[in-house]
Amino acid sequence: MKRITLVTGGSRSGKSKHALELAASYNNKAFIATAEATDEEMRARIDRHRRERDSSYLTVEEPLNLAMALKALPRETEVAVLDCITVWLGNLFHREKLTDETCPEIDAFLEILETPPCHLILVTNEVGMGVIPADGATRLFRDTAGSINQILAERAHEVIFSVSGIPLRVK
């Protein structure tokens, strides 16, 4: 049975580092990156993340269609680290693919989680622990991320909450 692990926490809480540690023991690993290099700061962030993982990972850069990226993984892939769900949601919002109605990319991703092609380690941000956003679009993003995170946590076999670099097993 393919397992799903959800690693969540605040920004810079050690989520990605822990996800890579969880995947380290596998031979055939993939890393699905959702970030896009839209400016110098994001390029530097992406470069830092690339340096944090070793060359044994097959890297797939896919900002929108996670279901397609998972389906396209080589058959021998044992585990895929998907980093990060909230960046992916931001991409969907930015491209106006996600509104308060429906989003085919989210539906397809949630569907593939029913029978994942390999073990999955999903990284996401917990965005609901701060101040209430002042504008409607930001509240919609926060609410959507919270709803997706709840669905992912329900489907995951294990949920880890990272705080200040310390992973805490929640489920």
Image (cartoon, grey):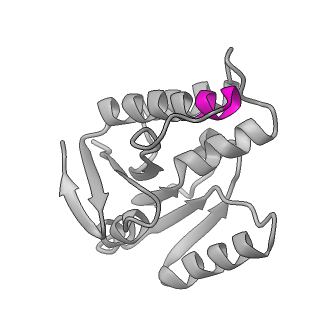
Say which residue appears at 38% left-offset and 62% top-offset: 15
Residue 56: x, y in percent?
49, 80
Labels in figure, total? 0
- Look at the image and tell me whether residue 59 can be seen: yes
Give the camera-side residue of 68 and 161: 161
- Give the vertical position of 76 relative to 165 (above or below): above
Q: Residue at x 52, y 28 (%)?
A: 143
Q: Is 65 above or below relative to 151?
A: below
Q: Is residue 139 magenta?
A: yes
Res 36 quadrant in image = bottom right
Task: Write down the quadrant of residue 27 in the picture.
Answer: bottom left
Residue 31, percent across and down? 53, 64
The question of residue 52 being in magenta is answered with no
Residue 126: quadrant of the picture: top left
Q: Which residue is rendered at x = 40% and y = 28% of the image?
A: 151
Residue occupying the far top of the picture: 101
Q: Quadrant of the N terminus?
A: top left
In the image, 131 versus 60, the foreground residue is: 131
Residue 63 lies, in percent from the top left, at: 70, 51
Overall secondary structure of the magenta section: helix
Residue located at (64% from left, 55% from top): 34
Residue range of the region highlighted in magenta in the rendering: 135-141
User: Is 140 situated left or right of 23 in this image?
Assistant: right
**Is residue 98 left or right of 115 when viewed as pictured?**
right
